[in-house]
Amino acid sequence: MLAVLLLDSIQDFVCSTQKHVNNELPEVDFNGGVGTAQMLGNTNYIALVGGGKQPKFAQNKASRFEWGGLIHVIIWDDLKAKIAAQVSVLTSVRGVRITRTHIVVALLNSIRVYHFQSNPTLYQAYETASNPYGLCCLSASILIFPGRTAGQVQVVELNSGNVSIIPAHTGALRALALSRDDEIIASASETGTLVRVFATSNCAKIAELRRGVDHADVFSISISPSGQLLAVTSDKATLHVFDIPHPSKPPRSELATGHRRLTSLGGGGNSSPTTPDPDARNKWGILGKLPLMPRLFSDIYSFATATFSIGEEPLSASSNPLTASDAGPKASKGVIGWTSDESLIVVGAGTDSRWEKFIIAEGEDGKRYCIRDGWKRILRVE
């Protein structure tokens, strides 16, 4: 499922791995802007926050804008077309996450956790370092978000309340990801050159991946369903795909991977496959084995890359959300979603919003490639 935010409404789409965005659901007209939406899986519940030039829902209590009561975050029941629950806060919301049991609201300097019920009650609040991107990941049992010190990651076990701290980076965090089995955490800082991977069981670092050498704004990090591949996008308009170790699974090289064979160039996307990176652990050959060489010569690099569309809109607002108004964040770019270990999508909002599908396939040379298999504009141009 894919939720698209418009100036005065929200539109849901059903996504298919073969037909892309193939089923446009009825548009919900709120007669006001929605800046943030978070879907609860494939259920009829969507967490919404007002945004845009004319936000529908109150951005904070000082705004005095009422609709069904003074609220900030609402849980919308799309089946019944009414509010199922609501949460009020005093400052602008930077992000929202939702499960069947919890609602998590990310503010600039705190994370607030509520029990999901008709009248949500505050379960816990945690202080954080400045979190303008609203970073947090939520599953049925684990919550992760920035720590009190820039570069730290807090890991909360929701059942026990136990909190662990991971000193992931020396600078502020830019992106976070949690694997579907809750065993792996990945993070990137605002520098954007490295992605670090940790095991949730003991908070140990299990991999350090080099996206590049130059500074970049990381848009999205996502871990594949198996937990053995990681993808990352940035303002360089490049999608990188890495192998990562899994704490409780054998290496992929010991498994029958069954990769799709690359039988034609470009597939349905009119795009030739990118040249795969050299062996991820031996990109620099013998230089990576020499003592006293800079670390970048021995780092792990992506095994495949591809380009994706970021449009022609300026990215300054998304790079520094604190410069944006309280009406909400700017259009998201490069949001990654895996549909399988061989297929992923990258979604970009804005005036040229589109949905791009990429596949990982094996070439005749035995190397893996990441190719664009197709794309489609999300909204029709009238």
Image (cartoon, grey):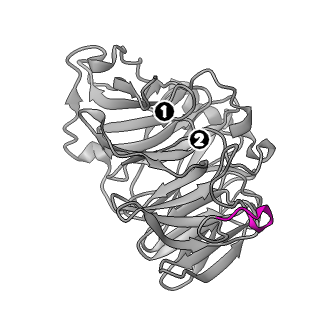
Residue 199 makes an appearance in the image: yes
- In the picture, measured across the screen, residue 20 lies left or right of residue 287, that is left
Q: Nearer the viewer, residue 153 or 109?
A: 109
What range of the chain is rendered magenta? 60-66
Which amino acid type is shown beneath numbered disc 1?
His
Q: Earlier in the sequence, mark 1 or mark 2?
A: 2
Numbered disc 1: secondary structure: strand
Position above or below: 83 against 185: below
Task: Give percent across and percent down for residue 331.
Answer: 61, 38
Task: Give percent across and percent down for residue 109.
Answer: 76, 64
Based on the displayed image, in which of its 4 quarters is residue 23 positioned? top left
Residue at coordinates 54% horizontally, 41% vertically from top-left? 6
Answer yes or no: do the residues labelled 1 and 2 have beta carbons within 8 Å?
no
Task: Give percent across and percent down for residue 103.
Answer: 53, 71
- In the picture, measured across the screen, residue 117 lies left or right of residue 254, that is right
- Whole-angstrom CA distance, mark 1 to mark 2, is 32 Å
Q: Which residue is mark 1?
A: 240
In magenta stretch: residue 62: yes
Q: Which residue is mark 2?
A: 7
Residue at coordinates 59% horizontally, 41% vertically from top-left? 7
- In the picture, measured across the screen, residue 99 lies left or right of residue 91, that is left
Q: Nearer the viewer, residue 183 or 350?
A: 350
Crowd band around label 2 with a 10 angstrom C-alpha radius: few (<14), some (14–19), many (20+): some
Which amino acid type is shown beneath numbered disc 2?
Leu
